[in-house]
Structure formats: C-alpha cells, structure tokens
Image: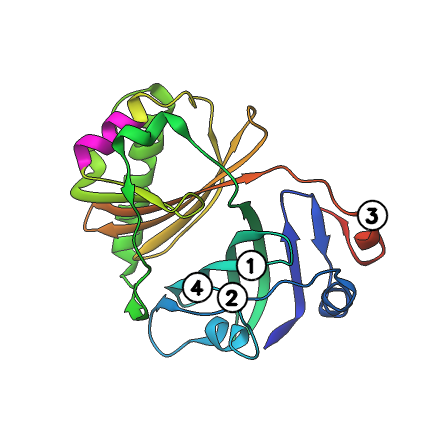
C-alpha cells in the first residue's frame, strides 16, 4: 500500500522515518507494542486505502477516518501495556499508494480544570461510515473560514461568527465536550492560551487538520475540523506535548 518514496514524521520527537524498511524495523523492535481497533470511520468515495491499510490484525478502542482524494485524517486509540494514548495522523497519497504519514501522540492522563463548568460528557463515537466531501470551491471557502477563526483566537476576539449554532468541540483525551456557539465562545475568551500559532494545516472540501504550536506548555494543539457551509460544525481538540525520542530508535530514524 506504500509508495516507493514513503516516509513518516513524528513532529513531537523530531524524528523522520525515511522509508518502509526502517518503519518495519521500528515496529519489530518496539518494546510493549500497542494495540489498535477501528470503531468508526469517515471518508469520501471509493478510495478507502488508508482504512484498508489499518484493518489487518489491529486490536484497541476506536478510530475515525475523514478526508478524500489524496489526503486523509485518522484518529486512533493506542493501547500500551501501562497506558493508553490517542493518535492523530495525516496521511497523504500519491497515485494509488500512501506517500507520507505525519503522526502525533496524545496522552490520556490530562486534566483541564478551567473548562469544567462548560463541559458535558463527550459520548461514544458512533460506528459506521460517514462521508466527508466537498468541491474545490468549498475548500476555498473553508480556507477563508479557518483564516477568520485563527485570527480571532490570536487576537482574543470571540470566534462566534464562524461557528454554527450547534458547534461541538470534543476533547477525546479527557472524553468531554463543549457544545453550542455561546459556551464555545466563553471557552475561548477565558483560555489562557493566546500564543498558539498555526504551524501547518491540511484543508479539504469537508474537513481540515491544523497543527498549532504553543511555547507554554511546549508542544502542539491539533484541531480536526468539520464544516457546515461557511461555518465550523465540529472540532476535535488534541494536546500533543513535546516528547523525547527514545535512544533505541536512533538507528532507524533521522532528524526532521
């Protein structure tokens, strides 16, 4: 399923996996290899390449896949012997093969007290297939929506104009959510994070993945965003802290 030029990146540790052979070696040598399971997917059209690549022999909790054409996003649970982490992956395709995967790893032992008064339980992820698609014109509209959204956050202004009335922000690491334009605006206006800068983003017709960098605490915020017209209908919000690269992987990777 992989392109001859396949490579992977782990931004948190600054590691680049240069080729498929190195990736196989990492997985074969990984101490306490995690398990995975698919529970829910989202996608577009017949190109379920990334889904098919994940299917064989993966046991764990849930994953969602969204995207279409040459870019796909996955949310997945990683079950290690001593902990559970969540993963977010951007998968880019060339032709009929996977060309590049960028992956972040998010711990589940986190607690955010400042949003407690606004949150409700996230609820179970619904199983099944959900289409996430859109035209090139939709993509341009959503690019503009994201520009307005992140400009508002950076300036401390409420982003309510680009949020649908029933927008939901999900926090899978703490399994809670904030629902509704008003509460979400309150959440952002009270947030101590004002220095997050968009580092990179992938925007499709129906969804987008955005990586934001923050100096304190050191790491990345990931937003997997779904749109309803010109407005944002759902955000899955992840915190991916900076991590140390384990020494045993050094022979298989190179610096990003």
Mark 3 / mark 1, whichever is N-terminal: 1
Residue annotated with mark 3: 247
Mark identifier at residue 242? none
Is 167 placed left or right of 63 in the picture? Answer: left
Mark 3 / mark 2, whichever is N-terminal: 2
Residues at circles 4 and 2 in contact by the CB criterion of under 8 Å? yes
Residue 131 higher or lower than 17, as above or below: below
Mark-to-mark CA distance, 4 and 1 = 9 Å
Q: What stretch is highlighted in magenta?
A: 181-187
Residue 59 higher or lower than 136, as above or below: below
Residue 133 percent across, percent down from the top left: 29, 64
Name the front one of labels 3 and 1. Answer: 1
Residue annotated with mark 4: 62
Is 243 placed left or right of 93 in the picture? Answer: right
Q: What element carries label 1?
A: strand
Mark-to-mark CA distance, 2 and 1 = 7 Å
Q: Is residue 185 magenta?
A: yes
Residue annotated with mark 2: 60
Residue 117 percent across, percent down from the top left: 27, 29
Mark 4 / mark 1, whichever is N-terminal: 4
């Amino acid at each position: 399923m992989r392109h001859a030029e396949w490579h992977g990146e782990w931004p948190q540790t600054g590691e680049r996996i240069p080729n498929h052979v190195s990736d196989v070696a990492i997985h074969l040598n990984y101490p306490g290899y995690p398990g995975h399971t698919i529970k829910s997917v989202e996608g577009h059209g017949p190109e379920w390449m990334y889904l098919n690549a994940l299917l064989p022999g993966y046991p764990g909790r849930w994953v969602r896949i969204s995207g279409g054409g040459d870019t796909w996003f996955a949310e997945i649970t990683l079950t290690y012997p001593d902990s559970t982490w969540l993963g977010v992956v951007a998968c880019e395709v060339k032709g009929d093969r996977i060309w590049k995967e960028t992956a972040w790893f998010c711990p589940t032992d986190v607690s955010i007290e400042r949003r407690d008064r606004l949150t409700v339980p996230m609820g179970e992820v619904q199983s099944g297939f959900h289409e996430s698609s859109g035209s090139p014109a939709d993509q341009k509209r959503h690019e503009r929506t994201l520009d307005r959204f992140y400009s508002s956050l950076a300036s401390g202004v409420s982003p309510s104009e680009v949020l649908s009335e029933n927008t939901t922000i999900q926090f899978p690491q703490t399994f809670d959510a904030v629902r509704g334009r008003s509460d979400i605006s309150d959440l952002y206006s009270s947030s101590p994070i004002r220095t997050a800068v968009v580092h990179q983003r992938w925007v499709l017709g129906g969804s987008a993945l955005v990586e934001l960098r923050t100096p304190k605490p050191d790491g990345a915020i990931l937003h997997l965003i779904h749109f309803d017209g010109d407005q944002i209908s759902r955000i899955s919000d992840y915190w991916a802290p900076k991590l140390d690269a384990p020494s045993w992987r050094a022979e298989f990777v190179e610096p990003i």
